[in-house]
Image (cartoon, rainbow, N blue to C red):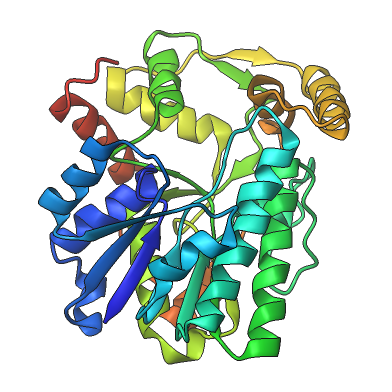
C-alpha cells in the first residue's frame, strides 16, 4: 500500500512514523507500507534527510495553500493520512488558509489522482465547549465551534464530506481530544513544570470534565481508519476511555512527578468569562492570543463519547491517563528534558 502522510514535522506525524517503524499492532492488517511524506517547500533539508534515513520514507515538497504543488505528492497513492494543520496562530486567517483551504486543496487533488481513501485529522473542539456539563458529545450532534481554530476544522470537515459525496472518494474524519505523550511540544512541558513547581493555577473550581487522549491511542485510531472498510464516510471522536475533572488530571500529574498532593491556586470563573469575551472579540478582528484563549476555556466542559469508534473501528484506547502520564514523564527523562 502506498500512503502519503502530511504533518510529519508535528508531533503526531512524527509519532505515527515512529510507531510504524516499530511495527505498531494496528498496522499489521495493512501489510507493507510504502510511505511518502509531504514537507512544506523550503523545509529544513537536514530534517528531510533525517526522515529518509531514520524511517525509510520518501520525501516530497509541496504547499497545502498551492493546489498545483500537491499533484506529485499524491501520484500513485492509495491512502492519504492528512495530519497537517495549524493549532496556534497569531492571525485568524492562518487557520483557514492551512486547516480549511489546505485540506480542500489536498482532497481535491487526491480525487484527481484516484486516491482510494482520505483520512482527515480534525479536532474534538468542533463539538464546542460547555460551561455546564450536559452529557457526552456524540458524532450526530450539531457542531458548535466557538473559536477560529475550531471553525477552520469544522469547515474543513464540511469540505471533506462535500467532496466525498460528489466524487466518491472514501473519507474518514477523526476528532481527537487534547493529546499528550512522547514528543510533546514546549507548552506541555511548561504545563508539567508548573505543576512540579507547586501551586499550579486552576481556572474555575477544577470540577469541569475534560477528555484527554494518549498520543499512541490516536495513532491506533489513525491506522484503524485505513483498514476498516465500513469506516468510509464516517466521523469519530477519539479519546481515552473516560473523562476526568481538571483537578483529577492535575492531581495525577502532581503525584507522578512529586509524589505529593496538589495545592493549586484557583482563579474565579468570572476571570475566565472575561477572557472568553476578550478572546471572541480579538478573533472577530482577526487576532489571536493563545494565553487568553486558554484562560477562556480551561473552566469549561469538553467531553465526548468514543462508543462509535469502539463499535465500528474496533478502537481500544489501551493507555489510560495515569499510565500515559508515567510514559510522558519517562520520555522527558529519557530525552534529558528537565521538569
Q: Residue furthest front?
A: 68
Which of these two is toward me, 54 or 328?
Answer: 54
At 75% from the left and 42% from the top, the residue drawn is 148
Residue 139 in picture, x, y percent from top left: 67, 71
| Viewport quadrant of the N terminus | bottom left
At 64% from the left and 72% from the top, the residue drawn is 160
At 45% from the left and 22% from the top, the residue drawn is 191
Please tell me how many numbered marks the rendered image carries: 0
Confirm whether residue 193 shows in the render.
yes
Q: State left or right for residue 92 relative to residue 237.
A: right
Residue 172 in picture, x, y percent from top left: 53, 76
Give the quadrant of residue 258. Answer: top left
Q: State left or right for residue 103 relative to residue 4.
A: right
Residue 175 in picture, x, y percent from top left: 56, 61
Give the quadrant of residue 94. Answer: top right
Which of these two is toward me, 268 or 296?
Answer: 296
Vertical placement of residue 194 versus 331, above or below: above
At 60% from the left and 57% from the top, the residue drawn is 102
| Viewport quadrant of the C terminus | top left
Which of these two is toward me, 167 or 292?
Answer: 167
Which of these two is toward me, 11 or 49?
Answer: 49
Confirm whether residue 305 shows in the render.
no
Give the quadrant of residue 323. Answer: top left
Residue 234 in picture, x, y percent from top left: 59, 80
Amino acid at each position: 500500500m502506498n500512503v502519503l502522510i502530511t504533518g510529519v514535522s508535528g508531533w503526531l506525524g512524527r509519532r505515527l512514523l515512529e510507531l510504524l517503524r516499530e511495527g505498531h499492532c494496528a498496522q499489521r492488517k495493512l501489510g507493507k507500507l510504502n510511505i511518502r511524506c509531504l514537507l512544506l517547500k523550503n523545509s529544513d533539508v537536514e530534517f528531510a534527510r533525517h526522515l529518509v534515513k531514520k524511517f525509510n520514507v520518501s520525501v516530497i515538497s509541496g504547499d497545502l495553500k498551492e493546489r498545483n504543488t500537491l499533484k506529485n505528492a499524491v501520484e500513485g497513492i492509495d491512502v492519504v493520512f492528512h495530519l497537517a494543520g495549524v493549532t496556534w496562530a497569531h492571525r485568524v486567517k492562518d487557520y483557514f488558509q492551512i486547516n480549511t483551504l489546505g485540506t480542500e486543496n489536498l482532497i481535491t487533488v487526491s480525487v484527481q489522482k484516484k486516491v482510494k481513501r482520505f483520512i482527515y485529522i480534525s479536532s474534538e473542539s468542533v463539538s464546542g465547549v460547555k460551561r455546564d456539563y450536559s452529557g457526552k458529545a456524540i458524532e450526530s450532534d450539531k457542531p458548535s465551534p466557538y473559536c477560529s481554530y475550531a471553525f477552520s476544522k469544522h469547515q474543513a470537515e464540511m469540505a471533506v464530506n462535500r467532496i466525498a459525496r460528489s466524487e466518491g472518494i472514501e473519507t474518514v474524519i477523526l476528532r481527537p481530544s487534547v493529546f499528550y505523550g512522547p514528543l510533546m511540544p514546549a507548552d506541555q512541558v511548561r504545563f508539567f513544570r508548573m505543576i512540579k513547581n507547586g501551586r499550579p493555577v486552576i481556572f474555575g473550581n477544577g470540577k469541569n470534565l475534560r477528555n484527554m487522549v494518549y498520543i499512541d491511542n490516536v495513532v491506533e485510531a489513525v491506522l484503524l481508519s485505513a483498514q476498516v472498510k465500513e469506516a468510509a464516510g464516517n466521523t469519530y471522536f477519539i479519546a481515552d476511555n473516560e473523562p476526568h475533572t481538571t483537578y483529577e488530571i492535575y492531581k495525577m500529574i502532581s503525584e507522578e512527578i512529586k509524589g505529593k498532593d496538589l495545592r493549586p491556586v484557583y482563579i474565579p470563573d468570572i476571570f475566565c468569562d472575561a477572557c472568553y469575551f476578550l478572546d471572541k472579540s480579538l478573533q472577530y478582528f482577526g487576532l489571536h492570543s493563545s494565553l487568553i484563549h486558554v484562560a477562556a476555556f480551561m473552566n469549561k466542559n469538553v467531553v465526548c463519547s468514543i462508543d462509535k469508534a469502539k463499535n465500528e473501528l474496533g478502537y481500544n484506547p489501551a493507555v489510560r491517563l495515569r499510565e500515559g502520564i508515567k510514559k510522558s514523564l519517562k520520555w522527558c527523562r529519557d530525552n534529558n528534558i528537565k521538569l
